[in-house]
Amino acid sequence: MPDILIIIPTYNEAENVQAIAKAILAIAPDAEILFVDDNSPDGTGHMVEALHGSNPRIHLLHKPNKQGLGRAYVAGFRWALERHYTHIFEMDADFSHNPTEIPKFIQAAANADLVLGSRYLNGIRIINWPLERLILSKAASLYVRIITGLPFTDPTGGYKCFRREVLEAIDLDRIKSNGYSFQVEMTHTAWKLGFRIVEVPITFEDRRSGHSKMNPAIVREALGMVIRLRFRFQPCRKSSTLNQQHDAS
């Protein structure tokens, strides 16, 4: 069983799945890919099934209806843990997360439990965003850091690598976020549990094709979730003790 699994949630990403799979497997020949599809009406799931037929390193977890980003990742995490992968990635299908940076995450994970890809570490590396979106993103990061105390430059980012021990320690049943606040909740929970978390700089490029999933409901959920995390004093863990605790960095 390979050690590395790249989880990619999809909804109407038929334009991207073949190209992103090819790019990932070229840069990470030992990795496997799990697409978690929310019953995309554009045939994304069928395309992934065809890709699996030609390459067994590509997998599909088909969900019967659209449940959102958070539910897709939780389902993917459970799938990964059942199959004993040691490094589990989160990645978008639209090339906003560049596959060529995967080795950087793997290298950092040698001395960390969770590796966060940061768009803002040692400068801003974002391509093709309008100024107002950049301002909104920076403001959201500042809001999260002030309210929750998270000491990271990009707590809302979605390009990550977990060691399996982190996902085993988190009670996934208690992770409630479903939109982009899911990223904050997972990082905050791992941080509260005391795992070693590091950031690596990435270059983020706005999606090449398809449409953004951002909407007002996702923004409202994020605002509320960040406030709830501020007062979540008890960490989400499956047991009262961990086999090993780590210092956050």
Image (cartoon, rainbow, N blue to C red):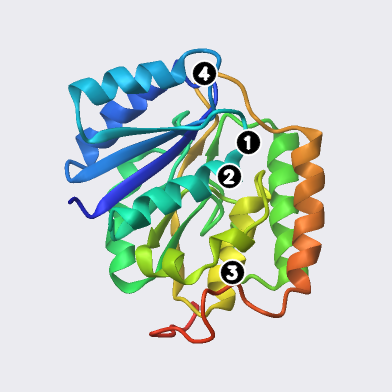
Residue 1 sits above or below residue 187 on the image: above
Residue that numbered label 1 is attached to: 67
Tag of residue 189: 3
Residue 216 in view here: yes
212 displayed left or right of 14: right
Residue 91 sits above or below residue 86 on the image: above
Q: Residue at x 43, y 21 (%)?
A: 45
Residue 228 sits above or below residue 12 on the image: below
Mark nearest the camera among 3 and 2 is 2
Question: Would you call the spot at circle 1 few (<14 residues within 10 Å), some (14-19), or many (20 or more)?
Answer: some
Residue 106 rendering spot, x and y as whole percentages = 29, 57
195 displayed left or right of 124: left
- Tell whether label 4 touches label 1 (CB within 8 Å): no
Secondary structure state at the residue bearing disc 4: loop
Q: Quadrant of residue 53?
A: top left
Earlier-in-chain disc, 3 versus 1: 1
Query: Which amino acid lies under the numbered mark 2 shown in the image of this protein?
Result: Arg
Mark nearest the camera among 1 and 4 is 1
Earlier-in-chain disc, 1 versus 4: 1
29 displayed left or right of 143: left
Question: Would you call the spot at circle 4 few (<14 residues within 10 Å), some (14-19), or many (20 or more)?
Answer: few
Secondary structure state at the residue bearing disc 2: helix
Earlier-in-chain disc, 2 versus 4: 2
